[in-house]
């Protein structure tokens, strides 16, 4: 792409621990990885945006200076979403001509947040706007929540914008305080396996938003039982309700809501333990907590397709798998694992054989990739 002036690499993310809690202001961890989205672009004299993708059909054309348009249910919506969120804060007068390419098939690695962050950075660059890393996180998140319509939290954007090669991102989604916890020199080597089930779905059409409302309903139940004032759903988060309140009210509420809350409070505890495990170089314990997080996603949060659950069950006992869980929400395609590199080939062989024996229909689409943590989105 030599004829382009700028090149942004925006990585995908994986979350070993702290899943489905960001939208309730919980604690999360994650990595940016060495696969992601590349955006090459030139800055234009006028405010037009012209994009094409090497991964998706069609072209996208719009004007950054014009009012925000309605969504078209097309990959171009992410670029329009970036425009929408930036325009709430800045005047945009210069557009770009760009080409976009993703490096892995879509499904659970948050390619949507990766492209959004690439567009936010590109439009900001074209317009001489300097953004702090956490501002990029917030702008991209607003684009996804308010424009695309997914009621998610900050996990994806934070991993993608703030991730570091040699560390684990830890973010408190209540205070927005974050830090990178460097690898303890005692920690054994690991690589990240990404196991694509072959199944792809969009989160906007999944039960993702429904689960978010179930968490808020659990919070409302607890507040109501305690005769405390309720607030509107947009201001209701499980994080604001002490664990003791849950202990005192869990048997009174419908099981469905109690389970969602159980996931939240237990994941909070696991992330705290996981951070200590990571700090002390205890990858075994960190991995086990990631497995437990997946168990809670299956039984308490009740997400995960039969395909993902099958991959998880097959990989859990394999030698050299420290831990792992559904990637992202678990409504889409992938499971991730932290793995001892010595056992990579054997793990891949056994997993592929057993999974395809159960799901031969994914012969063509089941894929295994090996990746490593990497730095967050950047100009190359
Ligand atoms: C998706 C959402 C995130 C987060 C995860 C689950 O990736 O976009 O905000 O909720 O699911 O942890």
Image: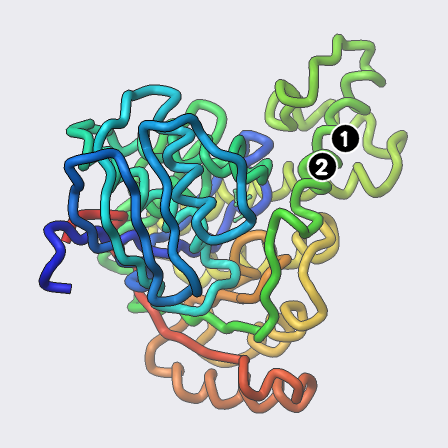
Visual colour scheme: rainbow
Q: Which residue is mark 1?
A: 218
Where residue 329 sits in the image (x, y, percent)?
Answer: 58, 52
Q: CA distance from mark 1 to mark 2?
A: 6 Å
Residue 248's disc number: none
| Looking at the image, residue 243 lies above or below residue 261 | above
Where residue 105 sits in the image (x, y, percent)?
Answer: 45, 69
**Can residue 159 be seen?**
no
What residue sits 33% from the left and 68% below the top?
Answer: 371
293 or 24: nearer the eye?
A: 24
What residue sits 58% from the left and 37% below the top?
Answer: 149
* Beta carbon at label 2 within 8 Å of ligand 1: no
| Looking at the image, residue 270 lies above or below residue 107 | above
| Looking at the image, residue 32 lies above or below residue 317 | above
Q: Secondary structure at mark 2?
A: helix
Say whether residue 50 is left or right of residue 217.
left
What residue sits 70% from the left and 16% below the top?
Answer: 232
| Looking at the image, residue 274 lies above or below residue 106 | above
295 or 232: nearer the eye?
A: 232
Say whether residue 111 is left or right of residue 203.
left
Q: Are marks 1 and 2 in contact (CB under 8 Å)?
A: yes
Q: Earlier in the sequence, mark 1 or mark 2?
A: 1
Where residue 262 sits in the image (x, y, percent)?
Answer: 71, 40
Q: Quadrant of the C terminus?
A: bottom left
Q: Which residue is mark 2?
A: 261
Where residue 229 sits in the image (x, y, percent)?
Answer: 75, 8
What residue sits 26% from the left and 60% below the top?
Answer: 186
Say whether residue 69 is left or right of residue 127.
right
Q: Secondary structure at mark 1?
A: helix
Q: Rate crowding at label 2 as few (under 14), some (14 to 19) or many (20 or more) other CA atoms within 10 Å.
A: many
Write down the quadrant of residue 305 in the picture.
bottom right
148 or 230: nearer the eye?
A: 148
């Amino acid at each position: 792409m030599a004829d382009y002036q700028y090149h942004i690499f925006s990585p995908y993310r994986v979350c070993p621990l702290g899943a489905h809690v960001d939208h309730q202001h919980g604690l999360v961890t994650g990595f940016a990885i060495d696969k992601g989205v590349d955006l090459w672009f030139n800055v234009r004299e006028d405010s037009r945006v012209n994009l094409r993708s090497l991964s998706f059909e069609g072209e996208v054309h719009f004007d950054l200076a014009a009012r925000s348009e309605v969504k078209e249910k097309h990959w171009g919506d992410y670029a329009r979403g970036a425009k929408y969120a930036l325009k709430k804060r800045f005047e945009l007068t210069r557009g770009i001509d760009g080409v976009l390419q993703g490096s892995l098939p879509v499904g659970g690695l948050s390619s949507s947040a990766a492209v959004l962050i690439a567009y936010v950075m590109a439009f900001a660059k074209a317009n001489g706007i300097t953004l702090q890393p956490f501002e990029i996180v917030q702008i991209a998140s607003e684009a996804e929540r308010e424009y695309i319509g997914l009621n998610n939290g900050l996990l994806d954007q934070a991993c993608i914008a703030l991730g570091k090669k040699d560390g684990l991102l830890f973010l408190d989604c209540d205070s927005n305080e974050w830090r990178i916890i460097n690898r303890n020199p005692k920690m054994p080597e690991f690589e990240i396996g990404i196991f694509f089930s072959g199944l792809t779905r969009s989160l906007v059409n999944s039960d993702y938003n429904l689960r978010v409302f179930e968490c808020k309903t659990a919070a409302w139940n607890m507040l109501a039982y305690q005769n405390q004032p309720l607030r509107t759903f947009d201001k209701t988060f499980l994080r604001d309700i002490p664990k003791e309140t849950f202990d005192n009210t869990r048997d009174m509420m419908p099981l469905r809501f109690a389970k969602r809350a159980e996931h939240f409070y237990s994941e909070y505890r696991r992330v705290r333990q996981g951070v200590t495990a990571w700090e002390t170089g205890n990858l075994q314990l960190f991995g086990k907590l990631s497995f437990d997080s997946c168990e809670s996603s299956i039984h308490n949060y009740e997400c995960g397709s039969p395909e993902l659950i099958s991959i998880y069950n097959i990989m859990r006992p394999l030698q050299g798998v420290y831990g792992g869980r559904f990637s992202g929400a678990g409504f889409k395609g992938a499971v991730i694992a932290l793995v001892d590199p010595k056992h990579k080939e054997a793990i891949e062989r056994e997993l592929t054989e057993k999974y395809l024996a159960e799901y031969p229909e994914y012969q063509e689409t089941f894929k295994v990739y090996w990746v490593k943590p990497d730095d967050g989105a950047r100009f190359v």
